[in-house]
Image: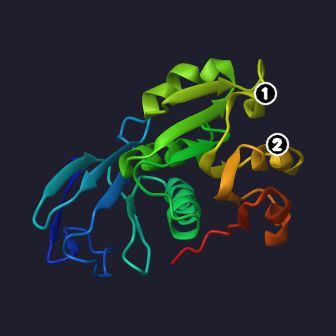
């Protein structure tokens, strides 16, 4: 019928044979699923053992081997995009509740997952995208929207904890200048040396997704 019920019992999702790896029993797990009829993916949380969530069109699962993230989706590409966002923001940059993150290309394949997951985590999200996607991005949970076709994000943003850099390398210097000292810039669009962040007092890393 296109619907799958997922139950977290003793640290495992029960009801999906692809879910093999155990997670801590009280772990907070994001579940990202695209409705069978299409449309915007929906991210929700399972926070307690034996809690259940029914989603439409639930397909394959991607499991982080460390038990830090479970993503259910109809499309493998969506799962990889969600996993990329997770590994960059949380595994590498250590984003936590109460921090602020700047997500570039927030309407894109990776960016729209990043916005949702960061909001679920309890972070404040500043998002860049073109103006035609403003309603979509705000609907994902963005707290502040910047239309990059009309204004420079570096003029509107400062002292964020994390930048998720998903745009061209030429904009990295401007992105670095929006990060507070000791913060993070994590990028997925081309490798760059970690030392690139040193002149700004910022930690930096290219993140290549690990399909664990």
Rendered location of residue 59, percent (x, y): 37, 58
The residue shown at (67%, 38%) is: 158
SS of the residue at dot 1? Answer: loop
**Mark sitting on residue 174:** 2
| Local crowd size for mark 1, using a 10 Å CA cut-off: few (<14), some (14–19), many (≥20) | few
Rendered location of residue 20, percent (x, y): 31, 81
The residue shown at (44%, 50%) is: 117
Task: Identify the residue position indicated by label 1 in the image.
Answer: 152
The residue shown at (43%, 33%) is: 141
Observer-nearest residue: 22 or 169?
Answer: 169
Between marks 2 and 1, how big is the CA–CA gap? 9 Å
| Local crowd size for mark 2, using a 10 Å CA cut-off: few (<14), some (14–19), many (≥20) | some
> Does label 2 or label 1 sit earlier along the sequence?
1
**Res. 109 in view:** no
Q: Is residue 142 above or below residue 19?
A: above
- Quadrant in the picture for residue 38: top left
Query: Is residue 183 shown left or right of residue 2?
Result: right
**Res. 144 in view:** yes
The residue shown at (28%, 62%) is: 28
- Circles 2, 1 touching at the beta carbon (< 8 Å): yes
Query: Is residue 212 shown left or right of residue 51?
Result: right
Pick out the residue farthest to the right. Answer: 170
Rendered location of residue 71, percent (x, y): 40, 60
Query: Is residue 72 shown left or right of residue 13?
Result: right
Observer-nearest residue: 12 or 142?
Answer: 142
Rendered location of residue 165, percent (x, y): 71, 50
């Amino acid at each position: 019928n296109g619907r799958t019920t997922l139950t977290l019992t003793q640290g495992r999702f029960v009801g999906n044979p692809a879910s093999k790896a155990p997670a801590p029993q009280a772990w907070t797990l994001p579940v990202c699923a695209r409705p069978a009829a299409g449309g915007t993916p929906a991210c929700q949380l399972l926070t307690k053992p034996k809690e259940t969530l029914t989603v439409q069109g639930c397909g394959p699962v991607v499991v982080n081997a460390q038990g830090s993230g479970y993503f259910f989706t109809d499309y493998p590409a969506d799962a990889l995009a969600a996993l990329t966002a997770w590994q960059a923001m949380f595994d590498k940059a250590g984003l936590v509740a109460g921090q602020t993150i700047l997500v570039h290309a927030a309407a894109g394949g990776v960016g729209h997952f990043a916005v949702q997951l960061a909001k679920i985590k309890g972070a404040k999200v500043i998002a860049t995208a073109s103006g035609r996607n403003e309603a979509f991005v705000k609907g994902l949970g963005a707290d502040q929207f910047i239309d990059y076709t009309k204004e420079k994000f570096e003029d509107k943003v400062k002292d964020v904890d994390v930048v998720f850099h998903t745009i061209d390398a030429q904009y990295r210097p401007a992105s670095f200048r929006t990060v507070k000292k000791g913060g993070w810039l994590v990028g997925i669009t081309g490798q760059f040396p970690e030392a690139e962040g040193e002149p700004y007092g910022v930690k930096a890393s290219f993140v290549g997704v690990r399909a664990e």
